[in-house]
Image (cartoon, rainbow, N blue to C red):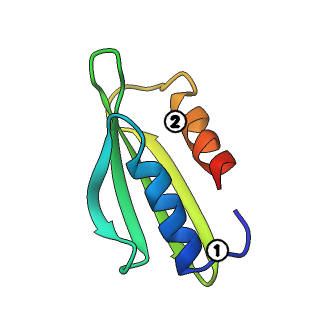
Amino acid sequence: MGAAGPARLAQLDRIIRDTQGTQVLAGSVADGQVTYVSRTRWIGFPDYTTVTLDDGILEVFGRLRFGRSDFGVNAKRIKGWLAQL
């Protein structure tokens, strides 16, 4: 993601929390790591996204909870969040 700091993590956290169907699962901005769960519109399957601030770098890791493929939903969601930064 590039050079960042706590303020950038807080900004991304606000963007993610404003996403319909997404809520915090664990962690906090103060901890430097937050995991979110986003429910798909169809059937409500959970997808997990973890954002970590590590040495000034924002690391974003999205994954599905069930199944073998998310059909690109997580990548699209994350790219949308990052575009808003």
Quadrant of res 65: top left
Say what amino acid the circle numbered 2 marks: Asn
x and y percentages locating residue 60 in the rendered image: 55, 57
Residue 19 position in % (x across, y down): 42, 40
User: What residue occupies the far top of the structure in this picture?
Assistant: 42
Whether residue 47 sits left or right of residue 10 in the image: it is left
> Label 1: which residue?
57
Check the image and report above or below for 76 versus 82. above
User: What whole-number distance in Å separates the C-alpha atoms at marks 1 and 2?
Assistant: 20 Å
As helix, strand or loop, the secondary structure at mark 1 comes to strand
Pick out the residue farthest to the bottom.
55
- Amino acid at circle 1: Ile
- Which part of the image, by quadrant, shows the C terminus? bottom right
Please rate how many residues cluster around mark 2, counting C-alpha atoms within 10 Å: few if below 14, some from 14 to 19, many from 20. Answer: many
Comparing 78 with 10, the one in front is 10
Q: Residues within 10 Å of mark 1 (few under 14, many from 20)?
A: some
Residue carrying label 2: 74
Q: Position of residue 2 (x, y in %)?
A: 73, 68
Q: Nearer the viewer, residue 9 or 74?
A: 9
